[in-house]
Image (tube, grey):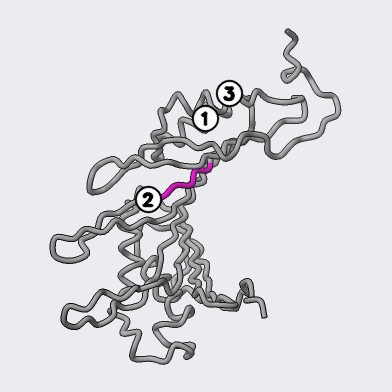
């Protein structure tokens, strides 16, 4: 059978992205406490298509993924990208994986809670390699006071902190989550300030700046963005900042994003 995909295309039109997406795949990640953690990820793999090719073999993306048995770390990412470029004769290669990451926490006497954090990695390789890590860290209000044998009250969720970063050397996901939660935890004395005040510890502006200051102090982080969202009925407020390499004082931008309004 004639290989149509590899035939020369004389129209000289480049295709920026061609590949496969939404692959549900079991993956193994590095875990600081247990060495490895198994989870299920959604994987996207794509390359650019030079103008002299009519197409590419889509099955090769999954073949390459299977060769690495679902192990993902910075070193494996680089091997996968290099093989994608070589086998598909591409100038650029990209891999995106999105996965839930689980942390075990003590929630009281003889009680253990499992916390879930949505993470995403985007690795690319053209003339240089690049890796971006995204983490969503839920923000909960302070624990309610409890008296006697009353049932525990539901915490709900105040909002979420979305972190995207590039790093110089490897950083544990657990350490990044801990840095954010140290800022969003009870030591901010949320109850001491009215929630509507822009300089209140409970405001999206204050939390964004505090998280940005914390991340900027980490020597291995070279670039990051922070977005803090407060989830409310009818609308959501947010604040975001970007800290390029070499910038010492993050500054926040804020606003209001409108959510679905309740029907009248």
Q: Is residue 72 above or below residue 66?
A: below
Question: Residue at the spot x=46%, y=61% of the render?
Answer: 163
Question: Residue at the spot x=52%, y=30% of the render?
Answer: 82
Front label number (1 vs 2): 2
Residues in magenta, as a range: 96-101
Q: Quadrant of the C terminus?
A: bottom right
Of mark 1 and mark 3, the one earlier in the sequence is 3
Of mark 1 and mark 2, the one earlier in the sequence is 1
Q: Relative to the observer, which residue lies in front, 168 or 92?
A: 92
Q: Relative to the observer, which residue lies in front, 119 or 243?
A: 119
Considering every residue shown, the one lying at the far left of the view is 109
Question: Residue at the spot x=47%, y=55% of the render?
Answer: 134
Q: CA distance from mark 3 to mark 2?
A: 28 Å
Front label number (1 vs 3): 3
The overriding secondary structure of the stretch rendered in magenta is: strand
Picture quadrant where residue 141 is located: bottom left
Q: Is residue 256 above or below residue 178?
A: below
Give the residue pinned by disc 1: 82
Q: Relative to the observer, which residue lies in front, 130 or 211?
A: 211
Of mark 3 and mark 2, the one earlier in the sequence is 3
Q: Is residue 36 above or below residue 59?
A: below
Helix, strand or loop at label 2? It is strand
Question: Residue at the spot x=61%, y=74% of the render?
Answer: 257
Q: CA distance from mark 1 to mark 3?
A: 13 Å
Give the residue pinned by disc 3: 60
Helix, strand or loop at label 3? It is helix
Q: Residues within 10 Å of mark 3 (few under 14, many from 20)?
A: some
Q: CA distance from mark 1 to mark 2?
A: 26 Å
Q: Can you see residue 20? A: yes
Give the residue pinned by disc 2: 101
């Amino acid at each position: 059978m004639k290989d149509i995909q590899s035939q020369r295309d004389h129209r000289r039109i480049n295709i920026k992205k061609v590949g496969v997406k939404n692959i549900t795949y079991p993956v193994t990640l590095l875990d600081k406490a247990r060495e490895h953690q198994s989870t299920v990820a959604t994987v996207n793999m794509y390359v650019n298509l030079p103008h002299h090719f009519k197409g590419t073999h889509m099955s090769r993306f999954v073949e390459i993924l299977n060769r690495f048995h679902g192990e993902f770390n910075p070193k494996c990412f680089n091997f996968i990208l290099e093989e994608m470029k070589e086998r598909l004769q591409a100038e650029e290669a990209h891999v995106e994986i999105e996965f839930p990451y689980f942390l075990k926490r003590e929630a009281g006497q003889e009680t253990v809670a499992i916390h879930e954090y949505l993470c995403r990695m985007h690795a690319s390789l053209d003339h240089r390699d690049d890796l971006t890590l995204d983490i969503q860290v839920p923000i909960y209000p302070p624990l309610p006071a409890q008296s006697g044998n009353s049932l525990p009250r539901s915490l709900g969720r105040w909002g979420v902190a979305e972190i995207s970063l590039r790093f110089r050397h490897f950083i544990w996901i657990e350490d990044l989550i801990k840095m954010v939660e140290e800022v969003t935890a009870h030591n901010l004395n949320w109850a001491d300030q009215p929630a509507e005040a822009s300089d209140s510890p409970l405001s999206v502006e204050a939390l964004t700046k505090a998280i940005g200051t914390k991340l900027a102090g980490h020597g291995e982080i070279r670039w990051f963005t922070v977005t803090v969202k407060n989830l409310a009925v009818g609308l959501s407020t947010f604040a975001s900042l970007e800290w390029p390499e070499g910038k010492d004082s993050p500054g926040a931008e804020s606003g209001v994003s409108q959510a679905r309004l309740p029907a009248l």
